[in-house]
Image (cartoon, rainbow, N blue to C red):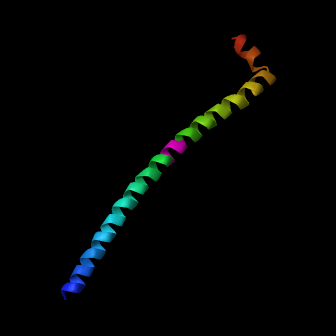
């Protein structure tokens, strides 16, 4: 009976260690996701500016704004 009990305690210890490692890995992945989302947002804003400027120049929008 003690052998089975000791084996189960060992398995619980192993699983607890695995759980802690997985939690740490999950936190790392969440941080990476957050960083990537921030970078994506920055790139999207940069793209909007790059697309808007040629459109702004092409449409003569600058003449409308300067006439105000």
Q: Which residue lies furthest to the right in this view?
A: 58
Q: Relative to 1, does residue 16 appear above or below in the rendering?
A: above
Q: Relative to 20, does residue 15 appear above or below in the rendering?
A: below
**Residue nearest the observer in this picture, 21 or 6:** 6
64 left or right of 28?
right
Q: Inspect the magenta stretch and tell me whether residue 19 lies in it.
A: no
**Residue pictured at 59% horizontal, 41% vertical:** 40
Split into 4 quadrants, where in the image is the N terminus? bottom left
**Residue nearest the observer in this picture, 47 or 60:** 47
| Predominant SS along the magenta part | helix
Q: Position of residue 57 (x, y in %)?
A: 78, 21
**Residue pictured at 54% horizontal, 44% vertical:** 36
Residue stretch rendered in magenta on the structure: 33-37
**Residue nearest the observer in this picture, 2 or 16:** 2
21 left or right of 45?
left
Q: Which residue lies furthest to the front in this view?
A: 3
Q: Is any part of residue 22 visible from this angle?
A: yes
Q: Which residue lies furthest to the top in this view?
A: 67
């Amino acid at each position: 009976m003690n052998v089975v009990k000791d084996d189960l305690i060992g398995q619980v210890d192993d699983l607890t260690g695995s759980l802690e490692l997985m939690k740490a890995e999950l936190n790392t992945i969440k941080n990476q996701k957050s960083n990537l989302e921030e970078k994506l947002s920055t790139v999207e804003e940069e793209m909007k500016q790059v697309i808007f400027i040629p459109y702004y120049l092409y449409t003569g929008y600058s003449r409308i704004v300067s006439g105000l």
